[in-house]
Amino acid sequence: MNQRIGHIARNTFREAVRDRVLYNLIAFALLLSGAAILIGQISIDVERLVVVNLGLTAISLFGVVIAIFIGIGLVSKEIEKRTLYTVLSRPVRRWEFIVGKFFGLAGTLVVNTFFMAIGVFGALLYVAHKFSAADAQILVALYFIVLEFLIICSLSLLFSSFSSPLLSAVFAFSLFVIGSFADDLRGFAGMAHGFTRWIATGAAYLVPNFSALNVITSVAHQQSLSMRLVMQNTLYAVFYTVMALSGAVLIFERRNLK
Amino acid sequence: MSVSRRVTLIAAACLVISLAASVLLLRGIDRNRPKASIEDVLYLDSPKVIKRASLGFDGLMACIYWTRTVQYFGHRHFDGSQTYNELAPLLEITTALDPHMIPPYQFGASFLAPQPPNGAGEPERAVKLMQFGIDQNPDNWRLYYNLGFVYYTELHDYKKAAETFARGAEVPNAHPAMRVMAAQMAQHAGDIQTARMLWTATYQTAYEDNIRQNALSHLRALQVDEDVSKLQDAVTRFGELTGRLPNNMAELTAAESLPMVPADPDGVPYSLDAQGHVLVQNPDNFPFITKGMPAGYKPPVLPRFHNGPSQG
């Protein structure tokens, strides 16, 4: 069972790496990190801040774009090319296919993030000439960004399991935007009354809370993050990912592929 | 030559020519367009809206707005503009996006408060900005210093300046001079020595080049003001003793037993006019001077900040 998931994940990773769009995005993200150096020079006294903010934001945004645009095609493309039938005619369960696809895409994003992070640390070394102990916090921000990717991958797969690529992209991107406003949604729920309050509160807890995973500004100011936050965010991302993947599996198991 | 190769060559030539032509045309269009500018307009002036629109990436947006602020001030200052209408909103947006970014507060204190052409002439907004900065970063003694400085130089509210310096002195790791400044402000607020002490502290503690140059220019101006006052007193003494004005600076120098003709911080000797007024020969080199200028002198629209070490 684990081996089958591993095979699907490996093939998904290979397919993603072969995808030219992916390469372009990585190159562009690295270019953006390089631009951080230039922006730092035309601004005043904020070189390090610019490098960290721009670098981590670029990693996050490009990763989100990669996760959405590759994630939405993972299932539909296999159906379109009819390769899914070949896979499912072998002793592979549908849920294994979904989980394997998820790990393949997640692996691709982790590798992407790793290379982009090298770019950010390189740019940081260029402007600051040395690393400080506080720079280790950047690793925590990168870890949170990866957690964010896991959630988005699972959501893309969820939408991909029942919808067309275009609609899946719209749904996934909308949820990313709404998730970035999750704190505001919760604030709105607090101000509302009656039925609206229930609906708003429910929506606020249902959408992914990406604002909790975004610690870029704190890290840029070398503020330390508590271990408790790291643990809570990890568990939140794991549970949310499992929830979305379970939804994807439930839908895909019942989908008529004839 | 094969057809394919010919097509490649022609396409490459078209690409290069079109690119060069479009660049040249764009330069022409830029010259013909009125100088109105993007920098005069803030399409979104609400910090809250911009913070929401940044989708949580407010740190990066703050860096972008800070860069835009620096560019805006630099361009307008270089153009000799008398107005900086967008400086305060830009600084307010930057600090709302990232309240812990310190340089915008210091920049605001130095260039939002002074009257044009040296700043935006909005000391009240500078105070508001600094107070917001202190609320967000209560442990940063430099912000108390900058706020006290605005009270002292622009609003001439020495009591509040003294209070602010005293509050800043209580911050852990505050510069020891803060306590001295608080005391000095309370007792000798209007003295030239107090002003010199404050500008020296600004020069020594600021990280940013513009702020240091500004401080240096003020220190040079203080030196000139002090020199001119002393020399003017000497002219008065000379008149009381001889019943006439000295013919030139050399005569005054001899009467005062000075080792040489007194010179400004650039080493250019001061001069005397026919009415016995002590004059700076190159007043354009000393923005912020209040004494030693010839009658009817108008300072240049674009003041020259000094960027070399002070000789005074």
Image (cartoon, coloured by chain):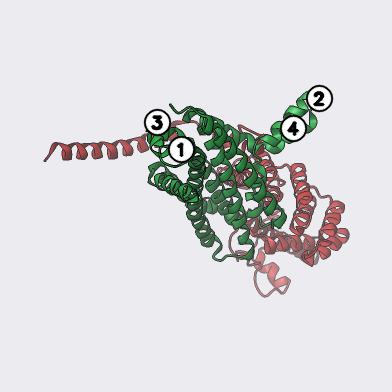
Chain colours: A green, B red
Residue labelled with disc 1: A74
Residue labelled with disc 2: A194
Type of amino acid at the residue the image marks with label 1: Leu
Position in image of residue A181 (x %, y %): 66, 36
- Asked whether the beta carbons under mark 3 and mark 2 sit within 8 Å of each other, the answer is no
**In screen coordinates, is A14 left or right of B85?**
left
Type of amino acid at the residue the image marks with label 2: Gly
Residue labelled with disc 4: A201
Other-residue count near label 4 (Cα within 10 Å), few / some / many at <14 / 14–19 / ≥20: some
Q: Is residue B34 above or below residue A3?
A: above
Which dot marks residue A80?
3
Q: Is residue A146 above or below residue B259?
A: above
Type of amino acid at the residue the image marks with label 4: Thr
**In screen coordinates, is B197 left or right of B37?**
right
Type of amino acid at the residue the image marks with label 3: Glu
Position in image of residue B39 (x %, y %): 57, 37
Asked if residue A258 shows in the view, the reply is yes
- Asked whether the beta carbons under mark 2 and mark 4 sit within 8 Å of each other, the answer is no
Q: Chain of mark 4?
A: A
Asked if residue B293 shows in the view, the reply is no
Other-residue count near label 2 (Cα within 10 Å), few / some / many at <14 / 14–19 / ≥20: few
Q: Residue furthest top?
A: A195
Viewport quadrant of the N terminus of chain B: top left
Label 3 – label 2 distance at C-alpha: 46 Å
- Asked whether the beta carbons under mark 1 and mark 4 sit within 8 Å of each other, the answer is no
**Going 48% across and 40% down the picture, which residue do you hit?**
A93
Helix, strand or loop for disc 3 = helix
Position in image of residue B14 (x %, y %): 26, 36
* Disc with the residue nearer the chain's start (1 vs 4): 1
The quadrant in which residue A172 appears is top right
Label 3 – label 1 distance at C-alpha: 10 Å
Q: Chain of mark 3?
A: A
